[in-house]
C-alpha cells in the first residue's frame, strides 16, 4: 500500500473508508466512536461546510486560492469562513471561531480558559506570539495542591472544583489579537455564536459521548448539572441545546470588549462560582480578573530542512520541545528512511525522550524562574544531543542535558500531569496573514464549575503539585501567585524563505508536542499533503514507553520492540488542524480523529 493509502486505511478506519464511497454530501468523517456520521448531526451547515465534511471523509485536503480556516467543529469553522469571505483578517475570524467553539465544544476551550497564539504578519514578514495563559490567583501558595500532611492531592481531586481555576486569558487574548490585527467590527464577530446560543445548536456525537462518559463529575455543581443534564439525562446527540447565559455573556463582550468579562457581572459570577464551589472552593478574586494581562512574546524558531519552525516559548514548553526534537533530527535523513521505517521512528522517539528530559527539568514560566531558553535550542547544543541518537537501538538511559545559560540554576524533575481536551485553530487570510492558536480549559470540561454560560478551566493543575523533587531540588514549574503554569501547547507556523509554508497545532496535553513534531515531519520529510499528514499514525514518546495507535504495520512495531522500546497501544486522539501553502494555493486538513473541518475560499 502507498504511504498515503496506509495512513488513510489505518486512520479513517474501514467504516469511514466505506462512507467515503457513499453520496458525497451525506457522509462525514468518523465521530468520537470512529464510525462514519451524517452531516446533519452538526445541524444547519452551509454548502461549503458540507463539502468540507465530504472532502475530509475522502481523505483529501480542502483546496483554495485566497484563505483557509480549520478548527475542531463545523459550526465554528463556518463562522470563521463567513468572516474571511467578507474580507476579515485571520484575527477577526479567530474571534468568531473561538466564540462558537466555546458553545459547541464547551468541554475543550472557551471564555473560561486560556490560549496561545502565533501570528505571521504579511505586511512586515514578522512572527510574534500572544500569551493568553491563565495565571495563579494572588492568594495562591505553592502548596495549593497538597494535603495537610504535605502530600500531593490525587489529580482529579485537585481538578474538580474551584481550587484549580486560574484567571482566564482567552477573552483578553481575543481582544488584543483583534486590536492588533483585526479589520472587522468587533461586535459583529459574535453574531453567529449569539444566534446559536440563543436559538440552540445541535449536540454533536462527540459532545454527547463525552457528557455521557463523565457521570458524577459533571453533575457535582448545580449550574453545570442543569446545563449538561437537562431533565436529569445527559444531553443527547442530535438534540437542540440553548445557552441563554452564554448568549448574554457574548452580548456583553461584544458591547463592552473584554472589560465586560473581566469586571462587572460576569467577573462576579466567575468568582462566586469558584469561591463557592462546594467541598473544593478556590481563591480567584475580582482583583485577579481585573489585573489580568495578555503578554506579547517573541516566537521561538528553529531551523529544520531549510524551514524556520516558529512556535510558542515559555510559559509553554511547546515551541521549545518541538524545536528540540526537530533540531536533533536535522542530521538524519528521515525522507530516505520513510514513514513506515522503524529506524525513523527510533530517531523520532528517542529525540522526543531527550527533549522531554530537558522539558521536565528546565521549562516553566520564565517570568518567574530562570530558564535557558536560547540554550535549549542552540544549534550546537541540539547537534550534540542529536549525536546521542547515532546507535542502532533505543537509548538505554535518557537524562536532561546541559544547555548553555546565563543564570546557572539547577531545577528538579517535574511531575505535572495533563489529560485530554483542548482545541486548535489554524487560519490564513486573503492578505497572507497566518494564525495558529491552541486554546484550552485543560481537562475535558475543565474544573466542571460553570459560570455565566461557560466552563471554567482547571489550568492550575498544570503546575507541579510538588515544590521539590525527590533529591530536594526546587521544581521550576512549582506554583506561585501570578505565575502561569507550564503548558505543552504548540501552535506553530513553519516558514520558508520568510513566508508561511505550514500552519499547524493540536490538542493532546503533553502529547501535543509529539503530534505536532510528527505532522511537520510527515509533510516536510515524507511529502504527505496536509490531510494525510494530520491523519498519519500517532506514535508518541514522552519519556517512558512509546505510545502507539492500533493497526500499525507489524514490521514497524516489531522493529521498534527489537530496538528496545516498550510499546503501549492506546488511543491517541490528536486534533491536528493544519494548512499548507503550495505553489497552487492553500490546502487545509482536519484530524479525522475529531469532528473538525477546513473551509477555504
Ligand atoms: O496547556 C497544556 O499543555 C494543557 N493544559 C493542554 C491540555 C490538553 O491539551 C488536553 N488535551 N487533550
Image (cartoon, helix red, strand yellow):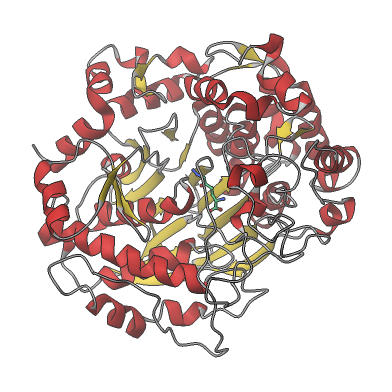
> Can you say which quadrant of the picture contains the C terminus?
top left
Residue 88 visible here: no
> Residue reaching furthest front?
149
Residue at the image point whose x is 71% and y is 40% from the top: 456
Horizontal relation, residue 145 to residue 338: left or right:
right
Residue at the image point whose x is 22% and y is 64% from the top: 347
Question: Percent position (x, y) of residue 147?
Answer: 71, 54
Labels in figure, total: 0
Horizontal relation, residue 229 to residue 502: left or right:
right
> Residue reaching furthest right?
264
Q: Quadrant of residue 3?
A: top left
Horizontal relation, residue 127 to residue 276: left or right:
left
Q: Quadrant of residue 274?
A: top right
Q: Is residue 181 above or below residue 271?
A: below
Residue at the image point whose x is 74% and y is 56% from the top: 148
Q: Is residue 227 above or below residue 275?
A: above
Question: Percent position (x, y) of residue 108?
Answer: 57, 37
Q: Nearer the viewer, residue 418 or 183?
A: 418
> Can you say which quadrant of the picture contains the N terminus?
top left
Q: Nearer the viewer, residue 309 or 181?
A: 309
Horizontal relation, residue 390 to residue 398: left or right:
left
Question: Percent position (x, y) of residue 225?
Answer: 71, 22
Question: Percent position (x, y) of residue 6?
Answer: 16, 37
Residue 74 visible here: yes
Residue at the image point whose x is 23% and y is 69% from the top: 395
Amino acid at each position: 500500500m502507498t504511504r498515503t493509502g496506509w495512513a488513510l486505511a489505518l486512520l479513517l478506519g474501514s467504516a469511514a473508508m466505506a462512507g467515503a464511497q457513499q453520496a458525497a454530501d451525506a457522509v462525514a468523517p468518523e465521530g468520537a466512536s470512529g464510525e462514519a456520521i451524517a452531516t446533519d448531526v452538526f445541524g444547519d451547515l452551509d454548502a461549503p461546510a458540507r463539502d468540507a465534511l465530504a472532502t475530509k471523509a475522502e481523505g483529501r485536503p480542502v483546496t483554495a486560492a485566497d484563505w483557509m480556516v480549520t478548527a475542531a467543529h463545523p459550526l465554528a469553522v463556518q463562522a470563521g469562513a463567513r468572516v474571511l469571505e467578507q474580507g476579515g483578517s485571520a484575527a477577526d475570524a479567530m474571534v468568531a471561531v473561538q466564540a462558537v467553539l466555546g458553545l459547541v465544544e464547551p468541554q475543550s476551550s472557551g471564555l473560561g480558559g486560556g490560549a496561545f497564539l502565533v501570528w505571521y504578519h504579511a505586511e512586515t514578514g514578522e512572527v510574534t506570539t500572544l500569551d493568553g495563559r491563565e495565571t495563579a490567583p494572588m492568594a495562591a501558595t505553592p502548596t495549593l495542591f497538597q494535603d495537610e500532611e504535605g502530600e500531593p492531592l490525587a489529580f482529579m481531586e485537585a481538578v474538580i472544583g474551584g481550587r484549580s481555576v486560574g484567571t482566564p486569558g482567552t477573552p483578553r487574548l481575543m481582544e488584543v489579537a483583534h486590536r492588533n490585527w483585526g479589520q472587522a467590527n468587533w461586535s459583529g464577530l459574535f453574531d453567529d455564536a449569539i444566534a446559536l446560543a440563543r436559538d440552540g445548536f445541535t449536540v454533536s456525537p462527540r459532545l454527547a459521548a463525552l457528557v455521557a462518559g463523565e457521570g458524577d463529575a459533571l453533575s457535582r455543581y448545580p449550574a453545570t448539572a442543569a446545563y449538561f443534564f437537562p431533565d436529569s439525562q445527559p444531553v443527547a446527540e442530535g438534540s437542540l441545546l440553548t445557552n441563554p447565559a452564554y448568549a448574554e455573556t457574548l452580548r456583553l463582550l461584544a458591547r463592552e470588549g473584554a472589560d465586560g468579562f473581566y469586571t462587572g457581572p460576569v467577573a462576579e459570577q466567575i468568582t462566586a462560582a469558584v469561591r463557592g464551589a462546594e467541598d473544593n472552593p478556590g481563591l480567584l478574586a475580582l482583583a485577579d480578573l481585573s489585573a489580568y494581562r495578555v503578554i506579547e512574546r517573541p516566537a521561538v524558531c528553529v531551523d529544520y530542512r531549510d524551514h524556520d519552525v516558529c512556535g510558542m516559548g515559555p510559559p509553554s514548553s511547546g515551541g521549545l520541545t518541538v524545536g528540540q526534537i526537530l533540531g536533533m533530527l536535522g542530521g538524519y535523513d528521515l525522507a530516505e528512511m520513510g514513514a513506515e521505517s522503524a529506524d525513523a521512528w527510533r530517531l523520532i522517539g528517542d529525540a522526543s525522550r531527550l527533549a522531554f528530559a530537558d522539558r521536565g527539568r528546565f521549562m516553566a514560566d520564565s517570568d518567574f524562574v530562570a530558564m535557558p531558553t536560547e540554550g535549549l535550542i542552540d544549534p550546537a547544543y541540539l547537534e550534540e544531543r542529536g549525536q546521542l541518537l547515532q546507535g542502532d537501538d533505543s537509548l538505554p538511559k535518557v537524562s536532561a542535558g546541559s544547555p548553555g545559560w546565563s543564570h546557572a540554576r539547577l531545577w528538579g524533575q517535574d511531575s505535572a500531569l495533563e489529560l485530554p481536551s483542548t482545541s486548535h485553530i489554524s487560519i490564513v487570510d486573503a492578505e497572507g496573514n497566518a494564525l495558529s492558536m491552541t486554546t484550552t480549559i485543560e481537562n475535558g470540561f475543565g474544573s466542571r464549575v460553570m459560570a455565566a454560560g461557560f466552563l471554567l478551566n482547571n489550568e492550575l493543575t498544570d503546575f507541579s503539585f510538588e515544590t521539590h523533587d525527590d533529591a530536594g531540588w526546587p521544581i521550576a514549574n512549582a506554583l506561585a501567585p501570578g505565575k502561569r503554569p507550564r503548558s505543552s501547547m504548540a501552535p506553530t507556523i513553519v516558514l520558508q524563505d520568510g513566508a508561511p509554508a505550514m500552519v499547524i497545532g493540536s490538542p493532546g496535553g503533553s502529547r501535543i508536542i509529539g503530534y505536532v513534531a510528527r505532522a511537520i515531519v510527515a509533510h516536510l520529510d515524507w511529502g504527505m499533503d496536509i490531510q494525510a499528514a494530520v491523519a498519519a499514525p500517532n506514535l508518541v514518546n514522552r519519556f517512558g514507553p512509546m505510545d502507539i495507535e492500533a493497526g500499525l504495520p507489524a514490521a514497524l512495531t516489531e522493529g521498534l520492540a527489537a530496538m528496545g522500546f516498550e510499546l503501549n497501544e492506546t488511543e491517541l486522539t490528536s486534533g491536528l488542524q493544519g494548512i499548507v501553502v503550495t505553489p497552487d494555493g492553500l490546502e487545509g486538513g482536519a484530524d479525522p480523529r475529531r469532528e473538525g473541518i477546513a473551509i477555504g475560499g
